[in-house]
Each structure stands twice: as C-alpha cells, then as structure tokens.
Image: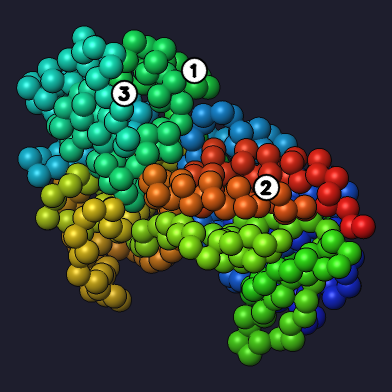
C-alpha cells in the first residue's frame, strides 16, 4: 500500500500507537529491514518522502523497454544478494554479464581493463590486457609488487596510496582511478582501504604483502564465476518483490511522507513527528512505535537529541550527484560491442564529460533480447569524483542529449547522430553514492556509537554500510537481528 492509496497519513489505523516497528526510508536497506520485521510478526510501517520505493534501485521505461534507472548489477561477494533473491523466488532470474570485458578511456588512448582484478588492481600485472593499457614500463613497475618487501604500503591510509606504493602511479591513474570513479564517484586517494575494498588488508597480510596476490586470494574466495550478477528484467524487480512480500505479511508502505522528529515518551515508546509532502499536503499526525529503523541518509539529523545523543556536528558525506542518461539507438555498427560491456573514463580526459558508459545490450543478454536486432541500449554516467575541479553545469534538454550522443560516439568509437536515437531518459540521483572516505567512516561510527545504547533503535543503509547491495543487504539484516534481540524495545 502506498501513501497515495491511503487516507491522511495512510493505512488502516495509521494514527494509532499500535505500530510495533517503523522503518524510515524505503530504499533497498529499508525494505529489507521492513521485510525482516514483518516476517517476524511485527506490525510494520515504512515511510519514505519520495514518490516510490526503491531508492537508487528503480526502473523506468525508455523507448518501450523496461530498464534499470539506477543500479543494474550487484557484487557477488558474501552471497547475500543471491540468497535474498532465492528467498524471494527469483533464483532462476539471476544472470551473469556477457564475458566481453570493459575498457578505460585515457588521455593516451583507450585500453582494456584487467579481466582479473579488483577495482582496477590487476591480479596479474604482466597479463596482455594490463600491458596494453599500462605500457611495458608501467606493467613492469606494477610487477615489482611481487618482490617488494611486505612492509611497503602497510601504512597507506587510502586505496590510492596503497596501490601507488605497491604497483606505481600508472596503475592508479590508468586502471584504479577510472574504476573507482565509476563505482564510487570518488578519487582513490580519498577512499579508506577498508571501505573501498573490504578484506583487502587481511588478504595482503596473508599474501606476504603482495597486492597482486591479495587480489587473487580475494577473487578465489568469492563465489564461482563473475564478480557481479544481475537480474533478468532488471535489478529493480528486487524492489517489487520486497514490497510484495512486506505487504503480504501485513506491512504498510507510505510514500511522500517525511519523518521529521523522534522523541522518547514516558512509557519508553518512540514518537515520530511526520510531514506529508503531497502537493497539496494531506493532514499529518504523530506516530508511536516500539522499534525504529532509520535507513535514510538523514539519520544523524533525525536522531539528534534522542536519549541525549548529540549528533549536531556529525558530517556524513552527501555523495557526489550522479546523472544517468540512457540512450536507445538503432545502430547495427554497435553489434560488434567495440568496447565490450562499457568504458570507464580516466582522469584528465577532456574530450568527454561522461565518467562512464555501460553498453547495456552488450553486457546483458536480456537487454539485447528485449531490444531486438540492431537496437542498442547505452547508459552514460555524469558526476564529479572527489578532488576533481568542479565542471561547468551540465546542459539540459536537447543540448544534454547532444552531449550524451557525442560522448557515446567518442567512447564507443562509432559515429552516432540524432537520426539513430529512438528514445532517451535522464535520471538525477543525489545522496546515492556516499564516498567512503576516512572522514565519512568516522562520522558513521559516531552515529552507530550514539544509537547503540538507544532502546529499540537501529540504523542501516548505504550511507552506513557502504555502496552496493552486497554491503546494504547484510547490514540491514544484522540491524534487525540486533533490534529483535533487544529486550529494551518492549515498552514499560
């Protein structure tokens, strides 16, 4: 049930104090948390100020195709997403990307990214695809990692510093920076090692300090097959399945409803002040609940003052604004997938504004089948990585489409004019990619420390767990497990 379908604040008896659990935020983290609570038999309400659930995992229609508007794959590490899909009856819909590889667009020309690597760090520095992109000198410098003393790089605070110490600047600039910019919209010199690559430091210690061997170890310990997977029909189908399961177990979902304050009542329950954000607004009212999960990026502001917590000075990273442009093109020259599954743009490239391009119909067989022969789907990402100069504002309307077509033609190496464009869509995301810098990790730790002693309160979400479903899903489940085990959540 959505807020649009409900009277007032929405839902049967929504004004009563009878909610046993309330979740703020209907991104995947919030929906996973709500599903766990509802399946545990708790009367659960989900609030979100946006017009539809899903957060950065949503779908849209472009030229008659139902496509992902945000996330289009997930990391296979830890197996948490695949397990959730199996529980939701979607195991047979899990698909692997086509094994075509991806490319980097660099100031000195294009080159393939390592087929065996981690965030651009090559597992085999002298492999042909690595040598092609780095050049002989760069590849030889990277291979020194295999013989350098184990202590080299051990004190590196960031991913960029670690890779530079072990493998040299060329690997950072030509391989790691394009990948990290595409994945995190950030500079590798701004990212803490533990946040960017969980388990890498442990793998380094177990591999005698060699970064290449550590990458091999991490890849070997991952589930068999590709490092990422998708869902036939789009990852956004996960959101639909979660919402259906929540409502099937008695949960209620209200969109266009913002949680603005939380206070503790005399009997120990939690009172939420809400604001309806319809236009015109509908009447809002306070809610009461025994348990609260905050899965929205505004957690620090919402929980400031609750039970004496002082979170006024906590500064969580807002994430780089990301604009995604999807183009549906009738161009048989793209049948050959000239740049594999896509292109990541390295630092210093001035001939394109895009930071990345995904050739979706070359990456996912289901997209190619839905599009049909000779029709292709490409998606370009625009957003500034940390440390880069602020670019001029992106154009709008037809001028933006012209820019996207020019960038796509440059990155794919195929001329593309307006005559081949069959449809397009522009989606702007904010707060979708918090950059896991050391400062952001410290801010998250401060929020978690403040929340830990609060009876009946938990937090989760990409802002806390890190980007990607493989981080978000287990963190949301762990938050609910702890909340359900908290006997303090029961009102006195």
Circle 2 packing at 10 Å, graded few (<14), some (14-19), many (20+), is few
Name above or below for residue 480 compared with residue 287. above
Q: Residue at x 42, y 57 (%)?
A: 317
Q: Are marks 2 and 1 in contact (CB under 8 Å)?
A: no
Res. 4 mark = none
Name above or below for residue 113 compared with residue 29. above
Circle 1 packing at 10 Å, graded few (<14), some (14-19), many (20+), is few
**For the residues marked 3 and 2, what is the alpha-carbon distance in whole angstroms?**
32 Å
Circle 3 packing at 10 Å, graded few (<14), some (14-19), many (20+), is some
| Residue 415 figure quarter | bottom left
**For the residues marked 1 and 3, what is the alpha-carbon distance in whole angstroms?**
22 Å
Q: Nearer the viewer, mark 1 or mark 3?
A: 3
Front one among 13 and 444: 444
Q: Secondary structure at mark 2?
A: loop
Q: Residue at x 42, y 34 (%)?
A: 194
- State the image coordinates of residue 363 (x, y, percent, origin top left): 39, 39
**For the residues marked 2 and 1, what is the alpha-carbon distance in whole angstroms?**
32 Å
Say if residue 237 shows up in the picture: no
- Disc tally is 3
Task: Check disc 3 and report the residue beneath it.
Answer: 154
| Of pointers 3 and 2, the one earlier in the residue sequence | 3
Task: Check disc 1 and report the residue beneath it.
Answer: 221
Extreme residue toward the right, this view: 492
Q: Say which quadrant the N terminus sits in.
A: bottom right
Task: Check disc 2 and report the residue beneath it.
Answer: 452
Say if residue 262 shows up in the picture: yes
Front one among 445 and 351: 445
């Amino acid at each position: 049930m959505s807020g649009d379908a409900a009277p007032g604040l929405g839902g049967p008896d929504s004004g009563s104090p009878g909610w046993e659990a309330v979740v703020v935020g209907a991104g995947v983290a919030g929906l996973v948390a709500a599903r766990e609570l509802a399946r545990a038999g708790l009367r659960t309400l989900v609030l979100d100020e946006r017009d539809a659930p899903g957060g950065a995992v949503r779908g849209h229609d472009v030229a008659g195709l139902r496509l992902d508007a945000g996330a289009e794959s997930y990391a296979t590490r830890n197996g948490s997403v695949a397990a959730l899909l199996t529980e939701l009856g979607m195991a047979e819909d899990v698909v692997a990307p086509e094994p075509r590889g991806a490319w980097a667009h660099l100031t000195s020309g294009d080159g393939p990214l390592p087929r065996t690597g981690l965030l651009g760090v090559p597992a085999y520095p002298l492999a042909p695809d690595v040598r092609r992109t780095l050049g002989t000198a760069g590849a030889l410098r990277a291979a020194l990692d295999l013989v350098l003393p184990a202590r080299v790089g051990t004190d590196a605070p960031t991913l960029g510093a670690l890779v530079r110490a072990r493998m040299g600047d060329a690997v950072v600039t030509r391989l790691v920076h394009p990948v990290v910019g595409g994945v995190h919209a950030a500079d590798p010199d701004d990212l803490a090692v533990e946040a960017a690559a969980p388990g890498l430091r442990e793998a380094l210690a177990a591999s005698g300090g060699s970064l290449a061997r550590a990458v091999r170890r991490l890849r070997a310990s991952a589930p068999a097959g590709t490092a990422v997977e998708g869902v036939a029909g789009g990852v956004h189908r996960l959101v639909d399945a979660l919402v259906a399961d929540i409502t099937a177990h008695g949960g209620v979902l209200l969109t266009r409803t913002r949680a603005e304050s939380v206070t503790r009542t005399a009997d120990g329950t939690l009172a939420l002040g809400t604001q309806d954000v319809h236009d015109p607004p509908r009447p809002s009212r306070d809610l009461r609940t025994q348990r609260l999960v905050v899965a929205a990026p505004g957690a620090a502001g919402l929980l400031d003052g609750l039970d004496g917590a002082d979170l006024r000075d906590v500064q969580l990273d807002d994430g780089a604004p990301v604009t995604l442009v999807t183009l549906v093109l009738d161009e048989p020259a793209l049948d050959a997938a000239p740049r594999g599954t896509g292109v990541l743009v390295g630092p210093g490239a001035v001939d394109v504004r895009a930071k990345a391009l995904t050739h979706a119909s070359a990456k996912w067989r289901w997209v190619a089948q839905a599009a049909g022969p000779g029709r292709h789907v490409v998606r370009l990402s625009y957003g500034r990585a940390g440390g880069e100069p602020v670019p001029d504002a992106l154009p709008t309307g037809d001028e933006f489409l012209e820019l996207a077509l020019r960038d796509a033609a440059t990155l794919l190496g195929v001329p593309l004019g307006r005559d081949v464009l069959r449809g397009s869509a522009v989606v702007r995301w904010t707060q979708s990619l918090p950059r896991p810098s050391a400062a952001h990790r410290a801010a998250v730790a401060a929020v978690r420390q403040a929340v830990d002693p609060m009876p009946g309160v938990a937090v989760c979400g990409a802002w806390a767990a890190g980007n990607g479903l493989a981080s978000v899903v287990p963190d949301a489940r762990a938050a609910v497990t702890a909340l359900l085990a908290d006997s303090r959540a029961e009102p006195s």
